[in-house]
Image: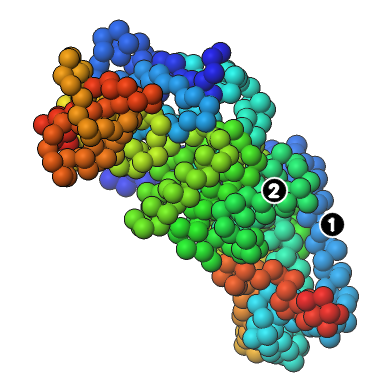
Amino acid sequence: MDFWNIFDKEWVPVGAWVETALQWVVDNFRFVFQAIKVPFDIVLTGLEDGLTGAPDLLMLLIIVLVAWQAGGRRLAAVSAASMIAIGLMGAWEESMVTLSIVLTCVIFCSLIGIPLGIMAARNDRFWTVLRPLLDLMQTIPSFVYLVPIVMLFSIGNVSGVIVTFIYALPPVVRLTNLGIRQVRADMVEAARAFGASRRQTLYKVELPLAMPTIMAGVNQTIMMALSMVVVASMISVTGLGQMVLRGIGRLDMGLATVGGLGIVFLAIVIDRVSQSFGTSARDRGHKKWYETGPVGALRSVLGRG
Amino acid sequence: MTDMQIECRNLWKIYGARAEQALKAVQEEGLTKDEVRDKYDCVLGVRDASFSVKKGEIFCIMGLSGSGKSTLVRHINRLIEPTAGEIHVAGQRVDTMDEARLRQLRAETIGMVFQHMALWPHRTLAENVAFGLEVRDVPLDKRRTAADAALASMDLTGWEDHYPDQLSGGMQQRVGLARALAADPDILLMDEPFSALDPLIRRQLQDQFLTLSQKVNKTTVFITHDLDEAIRMGDQIAIMNDGLIVQTGTPEEIVTNPKDAYVAEFVKGISRVSLVRAETIMHPLEGRSTTPKTVPLGSELGEIMDEFMGDQAPVTVVDPDGSAVGMISIADALRALRG
């Protein structure tokens, strides 16, 4: 053996170990992972059927109304323009599939990420354990876990949601943790001084005050989910990402461009709308949400505004 | 229990992982704050504090920042857990109370006002003020009535549906007071309530609070770092230094008879004109004949000095029946003024 080049040989067969371990998990616990898929599957299928099944113009109207409610007329106009551009390029169907994947991912990230963030904010030890895990989820190249995900969950849109979920979960956890920790100590103390329990303090003081930060986390999660769209298409997730991937595969620049532009336009709409939901009532001049936008307009028409 | 509304006995608070050990060491060896920090890596917050507050009294705790006064007051509603000692509030033992009863006590018996107002910015004034009732599940209409009444008592009618950031600092602290009063508690804890306000507003709020306090007959613990404020507000004053209550007494006792150099240093700049009273500086008649100028018992030094404006002959002090009980010379008055 050549001493000076000892690293020519593989001494520690990490690859083989991982493969054996994964195979063992697949052989014995695949049913667990198939069970995990169920809730993702239900939500995704529902959203996908709804979004693609509804008439295009109805969906467009709904998106514009939501944008108007969230961020006013300007945002409604921007959203309308972006969505119409997607439609005119012939990427409407695909964009609805992508939208449903992103929405499913956000629902599960919020459902799991926000409680995790709250627990992390209240328990330093939990946070020290959780932090490296989140770092890991964000730094491992997503290509690395595509393989085990496919083996455990098989391919398709649901597996795509799960891949995206792993990649997009960290920001909402981090920012929920940060938001709760940043609530002024005397605000929390005042709540306790007036007899609030921990739960009441959380719901009545900490969460509302942390909400802008939490919503920034949700917004980040959405953007990360969108950025996974192309990667996820490699495990045969349909939608805009697949257009891009197919374009690359066939050297079809036109198809790839349409898919790419579609992602950009969709990203603009989702980003702006979700950011607008995050601005606190204080920054909107203390107007309740139902006093503005289409709901506000309707209320004033009905004479209740 | 006595007629005391709040009573703390031998209260200790030591922060740190080795608080129990540190407590034992301090009690046995009498370590100083710095020694506790160096030897046990613990911070001595409150050191063997005992005090009691009568019903309807305003009890001022005065000390510089870091003296432990805010820590001490937070023991009364147990926002801070004592390391050792007993706390009695309104006939109930607080230090051993369970969580549910403690929350009830905080919501119904004790109101608190904070230095930086600590109003919740996402709630309207009415929602802020009614918070203590809300956590006790009082129905909305009752909550609203109580909140409106409390805000009205602080001259804030018409602002109920505004938000804290739409108000000036002085108004915000009036909301803080209204919030503390909303559940009609017997006890008010005020942690430097007026320190963050400018002098004119501070004076106004002090007056407003004193008037209110006489009217509603609440027992108040009032924290301040300003001795002038303590003397203005307090029936009793406790002076704290390094976690220890150095001296407790009426404003006059503190000013005329400081217990040690630390208190004396504080008291030096305080005007005695309205604090020192005739009975403190008068001398017995001892056969001297009375003079035509008389002042009643209980007169303030300022009033006595007015008597010396015309001529400098001694004044006679008379009791309510009109009989002479003592005499004050101009030298006595000047000596009292100088301290």
With A107 as the anchor, is A74 left or right in this view? left
Disc 1: which residue: A42
| Residue drawn at 58 percent across, 59 percent down | B156
Q: Amino acid at mark 2?
A: Ala
Disc 2: which residue: B146
Disc 1 residue crowd, few under 14, some 14–19, many 20+, Cα 10 Å: few
Is A54 placed above or below B78 here?
below
Q: Residue B291 appears at what percent x and percent y?
A: 19, 29
Nearer to me, A135 or A118: A118
With A68 as the anchor, is B252 left or right in this view? left
For residue B54, the mark is: none
| Residue drawn at 64 percent across, 86 percent down | A74
Is A168 placed above or below A65 here?
above
The residues tagged by marks 1 and 2 sit, at their Cα atoms, a distance apart of: 48 Å
With B288 as the anchor, is B28 left or right in this view? right
With B290 as the anchor, is B118 left or right in this view? right
